[in-house]
Each structure stands twice: as C-alpha cells, then as structure tokens.
Image (spheres, rainbow, N blue to C red):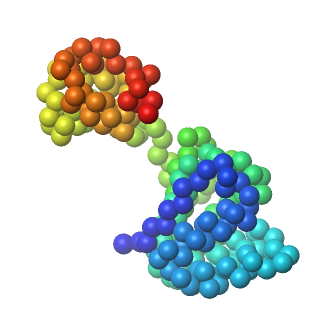
Amino acid sequence: MPKVYWQTLDAGDNDPYSFLRYLIASLCQTDPRFEDALTSVLSSFPQPPFQVVLGLLINELLDTGEPLVLVLDDYQFISNAVIQEGMVYFIDRLPHNVHVVMAARSDPPLALARLRAQRNLLEIRANELEFTSAETTQLINENLALGISANDVALLLERTEGWVAGLQMVGFAMKNQPDSAAFVREFSGSNRYILD
C-alpha cells in the first residue's frame, strides 16, 4: 500500500517557495527525512532556483524506494507560472515509485497532450464521478432510508447533476422535512443546504 501525502491548495499557495514549504511539510508528516534533506535548502539565502529544489525533492523521493502518492487538491488555485513550469519539470522526472494526483475544477496548464500520448496520464472527469440513477436510488432510498419515488430520485439526480456530496446534503436535509415529495419538487441547486 503506498503512502499518501495530501496537500490542499488555495490562492495563498502561489508563492513558489511557500508552495514548496507546504509540499515538504506534507511529506514530513510521515517521513522526517524529507525535512532533514530539504528544509535547510529552503532556508538558505539566497534561495536556490525553484527547479533546483524540485530536483532535490525528486532525488529524495527516488531514495525512499517505496510507493508514494502525492495529492495536490484544488490545484485550480495555482496560477503562478514558475510553479506551473516547475510542476511540468517535476512530473517529467518523477521516479517510478511516485504518482501525482491533481484534483482541480479545470485542466491544469501542464503538457497534458504529451502525457496522454505517453500513457502517463489517467484522467477522471466530472461525468465519470456523477452518480447514475441506480446509484442515486441506492444512496437515497437504501443508505439514507428516505423511500422516495423513482420520479423524485430522477429529479434529484437532475438537479444535483449526480454530484455525490450534493445528493448526500439533500438527503440529510430531507430527513427533517415532513413532506419529502414537496421538498424534492421545490428543491433547486440554489437551495441553502447545497449553497452552504
């Protein structure tokens, strides 16, 4: 089983060295050797070029020899060209024991066509994450025990676009409703439970 390192990103992570610090901190949570090897480099003055630090990180990842998965969640917030170029460099040189998962609401500005051609990219798109009618029925009527009609299940599926978290939130909101069918008919994506 590979070790999984998770970094949730936001707009504040667009400074290349902050990005690296958080990335290394994520790796250090389960393997302190990353901190020993890389923290002093990031603290030096002047700071080495971004890609030099990434090269050192690649070497450390290679030295572990164990399977690792690095998850960069909400990557759509990263807009700094230095980070984008650095990630292309990083991904192109990844050791075979390391996989990068980028979760984003839009395609990252990476060399996706080249990665596809090399068969080094697995893409999971929104339509592959959408619940089907059968899955929605199971969630709503079996798991959440709401017992609503097939028509109401179809309406919920349409209005949430099969978004699992949305379906769960609606299901939880419906548990407090005296008339589930009326709630489903009046429900829309602007419903406060979904917006929250």
Question: Which residue is depicted at the point 57% across and 77% down?
Answer: 61
Q: Position of residue 70 (x, y in %)?
A: 52, 64
Q: Is residue 58 visible?
A: yes
Determine the image quadrant of residue 37: bottom right
Q: Position of residue 128 (x, y in %)?
A: 41, 39
Question: Which residue is depicted at the point 31% across and 23% down?
Answer: 156
Determine the image quadrant of residue 146: top left
Q: Image height check: is 178 above or below 18?
A: above
* Quarter containing the N terminus: bottom left
Q: Position of residue 30 (x, y in %)?
A: 47, 77
Q: Position of residue 123 (x, y in %)?
A: 50, 48
Q: Nearer the viewer, residue 5 or 40?
A: 40
Question: Which residue is depicted at the point 76% across and 74% down?
Answer: 52
Question: Which residue is depicted at the point 13% across and 27% down?
Answer: 147
Judge left or right: residue 158 versus residue 78: left
Q: Nearer the viewer, residue 74 or 86?
A: 74
* Quarter containing the C terminus: top left
Q: Is residue 92 visible?
A: no
Q: Image height check: is 152 above or below 95?
A: above
